[in-house]
């Protein structure tokens, strides 16, 4: 019985951790449409995800924090404009 309760508790924490992940759109038109529908601003992150040290630091120190995620989910549409060097884009 203890193993079942422990498993349920662990699964609950995993679900909460995944629920905190943000969705970064990569299509400007889609972001604009969602921002108009929700009446919230768009935060555009211009990044070089595979080469820009400052972009990686911004992601780690700001965009990955619980406080930012909580705020962004309610108040922003997130748009990522990526310019990588070694990652192929569609």
Image: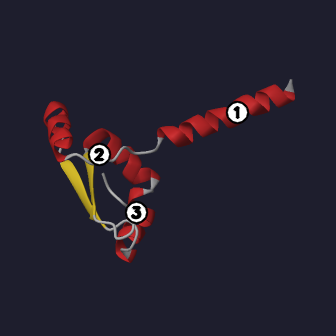
Tell us which disc is closer to us: 2 or 1: 2
Outermost residue on the bottom side: it is 53
Using the numbered discs, state the Cα–Cα distance from disc 2 to disc 3 in whole angstroms. 15 Å
Q: Residues within 10 Å of mark 1 (few under 14, many from 20)?
A: few
Q: Is residue 10 above or below residue 22?
A: above
Residue found 29% across the figure and 45% down from its top: 25
Give the mark nearest the N terminus, 2 or 3.
Answer: 2
Give the mark nearest the N terminus, 3 or 1.
Answer: 1
User: What residue would you read off at disc 1?
Assistant: 9
Using the numbered discs, state the Cα–Cα distance from disc 3 to disc 1 in whole angstroms. 29 Å
Expressed as whole percent of the image width and height from the top left, the position of residue 14 reads 61, 39
Q: Is residue 12 above or below residue 59?
A: above
Residue found 45% across the figure and 44% down from its top: 21
In this view, the residue in front, 84 or 44, is 84
Secondary structure under badge 3? helix
Q: Quadrant of residue 8?
A: top right
Q: Is 15 on the left-hand or right-hand side of 90?
A: right
Label of residue 59 in the image? 3
Label of residue 25 in the image? 2
Residue found 25% across the figure and 45% down from its top: 76
Secondary structure under badge 1? helix
Q: Residues within 10 Å of mark 3 (few under 14, many from 20)?
A: some
Expressed as whole percent of the image width and height from the top left, the position of residue 84 reads 33, 66
Q: Is 16 on the left-hand or right-hand side of 53?
A: right
User: Quadrant of the image for the N terminus?
Assistant: top right
| Coloration of the structure image | secondary structure
Label of residue 57 in the image? none
């Amino acid at each position: 019985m203890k193993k079942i309760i422990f498993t349920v508790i662990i699964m609950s924490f995993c679900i909460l951790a995944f629920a905190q992940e943000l969705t970064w759109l990569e299509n400007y038109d889609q972001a604009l449409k969602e921002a108009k529908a929700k009446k919230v601003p768009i935060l555009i992150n211009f990044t070089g995800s595979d080469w820009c040290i400052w972009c990686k630091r911004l992601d780690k120190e700001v965009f990955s924090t619980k406080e930012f995620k909580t705020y962004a989910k309610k108040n922003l549409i997130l748009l990522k404009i990526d310019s990588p060097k070694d990652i192929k884009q569609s």
